[in-house]
Amino acid sequence: MSVFSRSRGKVVGGIAVVGVGALFLAGCAGSGGDTESSAPAAEAGEEMTLTIGTALPQTGNLAFLGPPEEAGVAYATAQINEAAAETGLTLDVIYGDSGDTDNKAYETEIPRLLGEGVSAIIGAASSGTSLQFIDQVVGAGVIQFSPANTSDAFTTYDDNGLYFRTAPSDVLQGEVLGNLIAEDGNQTLGMIVLNDSYGTGLAGYVTEAFEAAGGEVVAAPTYNTGDTSFDAQISEVVAADPDAIALITFEEVTTILPSLFGQIPSDKLYFVDGNLSNFGDQFPAGSLTGAKGTLPGLTIDSIAAFTDELDAFLEAEGIAALEEYSYAAESYDATILLALASLAAGSTDSAAIAEKLVEVSGGSGDGESCSSYAECAEIILGGGVADYDGVSGPITFDEVGDPTEASIGIYEFGDDNTYAAYEG
């Protein structure tokens, strides 16, 4: 087990466990605390249909995250609807494509979803993409709930109390990754960075942690979404001769990596949630042996029971098997939380649901712990307060809709260019 030099984090079986509260910035209107419902509350057990949309990446530079995220939503929806006879709540989901800031699929998809009268939109995965339409969503009085946004920009965003996320801020991932690189004995670091709120924000926190541990960032060139050539950035980083290179990118990493192979040892490469993928035979065997990466949430190994259940659900539904599981659990939890908040509010009104999201996540501090939709729904319908502990973690929203407890999974690539929980 490796213990970080700063007291807020440690690695346990591939998971960096981090307390969140002290790291988040103060300010901004609180999510879920100051809005008022414009719809009357339903009686317990009265039939309601909650309609939500998804704006997850079916296309664009995070398209590899779309299948696990949509699978998480679908699995949660099935469980919610299985219990409808007891709870009275049915969930309808309208699936949509967020795309990215290059293809701009959200420009037509968000108006389409809002036109369907959704109470909430789950998405986007990319922080930069979410920032393109958050004003449109919350301005329409609709909840935006991301399973994967990690930019710190959302912590202080003026969102009318309607933005929530199950992924922790990059303050945490940056600290974990920066300390990990330093603990591996690296004194100098080069980075190739996506030039958006996610990339530059995460790079800043990696730099802060790495330099606090005594290291030096010697090069950090950026590129823009839609770029197809990265020769200048690669040349700048390689010329700086760093001990290690962190790739803070999305799927562009598949174009960048071949030019790095042979110029830096594979175990000196570091990945982040935006590009951590099972590359398999995309590259020659052994190309990534020993490379490491970070991903917010518990490690895939630690939620094996959930992923097994998810696989069985997809097979039974005739849906293609997943190759990645990143943010599946966070998407599942987001869907469950929206349904529980709707039950607690007795309403499908967005503002009423937002008022209850902090409560059902345990943020009120006076709920009864529960770990499944059915269990939590029973508590709510019995007149109690439910505190949902999710698959992805305890969650527990603060007043601005950020989770106050989080884990960062640390992974290591094997000879087959796929990753597993890091046991260092």
Image: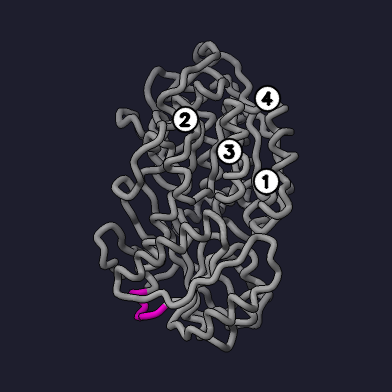
Q: Residue at x 58, y 51 (%)?
A: 128
Sequence-first disc among 3 and 4: 4
Sequence-first disc among 1 and 3: 1
Q: Amino acid at mark 2?
A: Gly
Q: Amino acid at mark 4?
A: Gly
Q: Which mark is residue 98?
A: 1
Tell whether 181 sits left or right of 89. Answer: left
Say if the magenta span includes residue 187.
yes
Separation of marks 1 and 4 at Cα, in angstroms: 18 Å
- In this rendered view, identify the residue nearer to me: 375 or 257: 257
- What kind of element bears circle 1? loop
Question: Which class describes the residues within 10 Å of circle 1: few (<14), some (14-19), or many (20+)?
Answer: many
Identify the magenta region. Answer: 182-188
Separation of marks 2 and 4 at Cα, in angstroms: 19 Å
Mark 4 — residue? Answer: 117
- What kind of element bears circle 4? loop
Mark 2 — residue? Answer: 161
Q: Amino acid at mark 3?
A: Ile
Nearest to viewer (mark 3 / mark 4) = 3
Separation of marks 3 and 4 at Cα, in angstroms: 16 Å
Q: Residue at x 71, y 33 (%)?
A: 111
Q: Position of residue 420 (x, y in %)?
A: 50, 68
- In this rendered view, identify the residue nearer to me: 102 or 312: 102
Q: How is the image coloured?
A: one colour
Separation of marks 2 and 3 at Cα, in angstroms: 12 Å
Tell whether 420 sits left or right of 73. Answer: left
Mark 3 — residue? Answer: 134
- Quadrant in the picture for the N terminus: bottom left
- What kind of element bears circle 3? helix
Q: Amino acid at mark 1?
A: Ser
